Image (cartoon, coloured by chain):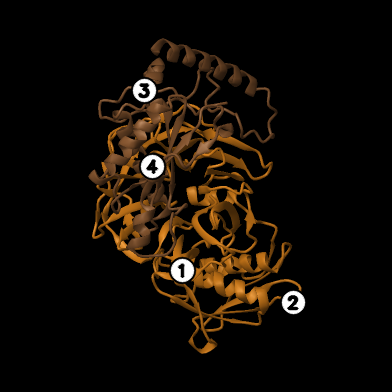
Chain colours: A orange, B brown
Amino acid sequence: MNERKKFDLFPFLTTAVCLVAFASAAAQNPEEGTLIRQANSAEVIPISLSGFSGTAQEVLKFDLEVHGFEVVGGDRAKFNLSGSNNGQVGGRLSDQSKTTLFSKSYTGGNTRSQAHALANDVIFGVTQRKGVTQGQIAFRVGEGKTSEIFIADYDGANAVAVTHDNNLVSAPAWMPGQRKLFYVSYKSGFPDILAHDLTSGARQKIAAYGGSNLSPAVSPDGRRVALILSKTGNAELFVCNADGTNLKQLTKTRDSESSPCWSPNGQTICYVATSGRAGLYKINADGGPPQKLQTAGVGGNLTEPDWSPDGKTIVFTAQMGSFNICTVPAEGGSANVLVDGEDPSWGANSRTVIFTRRKNGGRGLSLLDVPTKRVKDVTRISGSSSQPCWAK
Amino acid sequence: MKRTTLFNFFILSLVLVFTATGCKKVPKGTTAIPGQRIGVGSGKTDGIADGGIATPALPANPDGTIPFADGRPSDWETRTKNREMFAADIVYFDVDSASVKGSEKSKLEAVAAGMKSQPGGDLLIEGHCDERGTEGYNLALGDRRANALREYLANLGVPADKIHTVSFGEAKPAATGTGEGVWSKNRRGEFIFVEPAK
């Protein structure tokens, strides 16, 4: 339900979809063996593209490869997408037996958005899973001694600076269902938490207490914010209303708390506590005793958890010499080390993760398909990009 | 002395309540970053610890942590930040540690002595890290370092309500490059003297 809500709330539906033939009927009644439908299949799906060029070809290839497909020559492909982008993008998806699964064309928007829409339909047509090709991200771009918050399409296209403070910022977090970001700004000389309405441009100070004000995370219903304050003299986890009122302290430890995230039902917060080593903990969002999350198989400092929208899995960074993106069941258990990287954020499909990789002295964003562990780099803009967060 | 502090706090509270009431008149849609206070809806001054009025004296919590004064000095941006005064007293830390090392204690004593000789000033402590942590982790680590230094100075008698902290994580390295020679220079706490209002 959450997942559906998130898709519906963030439509880029400038693209009108015309169903020409077959539509989803074929997808719902597949020939045996035609469609790959395991919910979390780690199988890479070979697909061929024909008839596309330029931006449309690039977008389709990128989108499909982010979602566990591999674009190959026609002879190795299990599926073929043939079509064109002359004037408008359209395509016909067929399987190995040349049976047409759907044929669709798109109007409105531009070539890029039409190609994203077609890619999403191919992903759903083949896997019955929704894609995240129409998602947006917020992230931090550092350049020299300053940094700004940017938003962009999930592949890095159409990047736009949200802040122009010529100062330091950090930790953008999207308010679910709204064009609003929360982040940390050093404009006052101290780290304060601001809420930034992307439509009006208005900014509101949410937390500016003595000490640090860090790591805002908005609850799935958009009503509350989890945040880290050190106003007591030590970093602790707090929650407040989305306007900063009704502040409540959740932890009271000599440890240092950091990096909160919410369970999709809004009842639990997962966060990091550091005493010696940093580990993952869970706490009831209304207060209660913290519970350590078991993460067997990984060591070092564990940081930056993010809870999947389907509630099942927590992704996090393990600092074990280098940095590794890892997952663990939300109830705790054995952790999986996936790839090198840090600061992961789940896409709405609970399958694609956007994260940060260090390269050439800077940082850039990459997308990880969790079951296949395949990684694609997001288009880099100048400077060092990090701290990605998916629009929810 | 204590009475004066309490009186000042009372005045500050009045100002805050007044500001809060004033804020309601700011039209929505106006960018209102400077001066806008949080938590003003209840009509109470915001951010006061559960203990209420006890904040000005900033007594240590039972676990040794020392709370911050509510909010920040209103004249902060206009006051001169003197980075030279304690430039020789930069405190360095071990990897992934916020413990004050024995070798660094004399620097803290010098800072404490300097602060006591300038009772009208404030102190800003910057917590910094090397790049070998994630950005989020390093912001938390820089915060721990700054808080550890603040606690140490408060225990040396510097009034805690005069000590402010900021964590920059790894965003402001003292040296760039890689290797322990660089990293060890970046794991640090810096002290900035904030001169009294003129």
Mark 1 and mark 2 in contact (Cβ < 8 Å)? no
Same chain assignment for discs 3 and 4: yes
Classify A105 as above or below A315. below
Name the residue: 47% across, 70% down: A360
Looking at marks 3 and 4 on the same chain, the residue that comes earlier in the sequence is marked by 3
Q: Is residue A300 above or below residue B36?
A: below
Q: How many marks?
A: 4
Report the residue marked by disc 4: B143
Residue type at tag 1: Lys
Q: The residue under label 3 is which amino acid type?
A: Leu
* Callout 4: chain: B
Residue type (three-letter) at the residue carrying disc 2: Asn
Q: Chain of mark 3?
A: B
Question: Is disc 1 in contact with disc 3, using a CB cutoff of under 8 Å?
Answer: no
Helix, strand or loop at mark 4: helix
- What is the x, y in percent for residue B65? 30, 31
Label 1 crowd (10 A; few <14 / some 14-19 / many >=20): few
What chain does mark 1 sit on?
Answer: A
- Nearest-to-viewer mark from 2 and 4: 4
Mark number for residue A86?
2
Q: CA distance from mark 3 to mark 4?
A: 19 Å
Give the answer, above or below, for where A266 lies relative to B15: below
What residue sits right under mark 1 in the picture? Answer: A359
What element does badge 1 sit on?
Answer: strand
Spatial CA distance of label 1 from label 4 is 27 Å
The residue to which callout 3 is attached is: B58
Residues at discs 1 and 3 both on one chain: no
Task: Tell me which label, 2 or 1, sits earlier in the chain.
Answer: 2
Amino acid at circle 4: Asp
What is the distance, in whole Å, between disc 2 and disc 4 at their CAs?
A: 56 Å
Q: Secondary structure at mark 3?
A: loop
